[in-house]
Amino acid sequence: MLETFKALAEPSRLQIVDLLFREPLPVGAVAERLGIRQPQASKHLRALSEAGLVEVRPEAQRRIYALRAQPFQELDRWLERYRTLLDQQFERLDAVLEDMQTARKSAKGKANPGRRPAQR
C-alpha cells in the first residue's frame, strides 16, 4: 500500500488517474490532455504501472493505459476503517447538537412562562 501512496503523491499522477478513470488512453493523449511532454507522461505512467495502479496493453503501434481495479479496492478497504471512525465522530456531534437544541428550547420556555397576550 505504501507504493500506492508514493505513486499517488505526485499531482500529475493523480491527474492521470482521473483521466484514466474516465477511459483508457495512449500516452500521447495523456500528455496532450495534461499539457505535458510525452516523455514526462511516459515517466508518470511507468511509475503508476510499477506501483500496480495501471496496466498496459498493446494496440497496433500504441500502448493503451488503463486503471487496475484491485489496488483501488485495497485502498478503499484500508480507508473504510477511517470512515467508520469519522461516522462515529459525526454521530457524537449530532447528539451534542441535539442536546444543545433541546436545552435552548427549554431555556426559552422558562424565560417566558405563562406569557399572556397584551390587553387592549
Image (tube, helix red, strand yellow):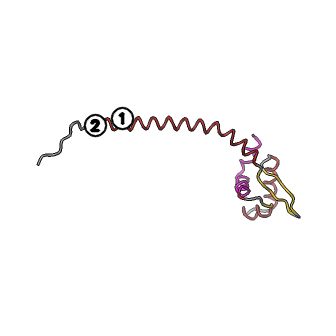
Q: Residue 37, percent across and down?
A: 78, 62
Q: Residue 50, percent across and down?
A: 82, 47
The crowd level at tag 2 (other Cα within 10 Å; few <14, some 14-19, many 20+) is: few
SS majority, magenta: helix
Is residue 42 part of the magenta span, yes or no? Answer: no
Q: Residue 29, percent across and down?
A: 77, 64
Disc 1 marks which amino acid? Ala
In this rendering, would 25 be left or right of 118? Answer: right
Kindly indicate the quadrant of the structure image that contains residue 33: bottom right
Give me the disc on residue 103: 1
Q: Residue at x 57, y 38 (%)?
A: 86
Nearer-the-camera pick, 41 or 115: 115
Is residue 6 part of the magenta span, yes or no? Answer: yes
- The residue at which mark 2 appears reads as 109
Dot 2 or dot 1: first in sequence order is: 1
Q: Residue 30, percent across and down?
A: 76, 61
Q: Is residue 109 above or below residue 53?
A: above
Q: Residue at x 72, y 48 (%)?
A: 8
SS of the residue under disc 2: helix
Magenta residues, as a range?
A: 1-21
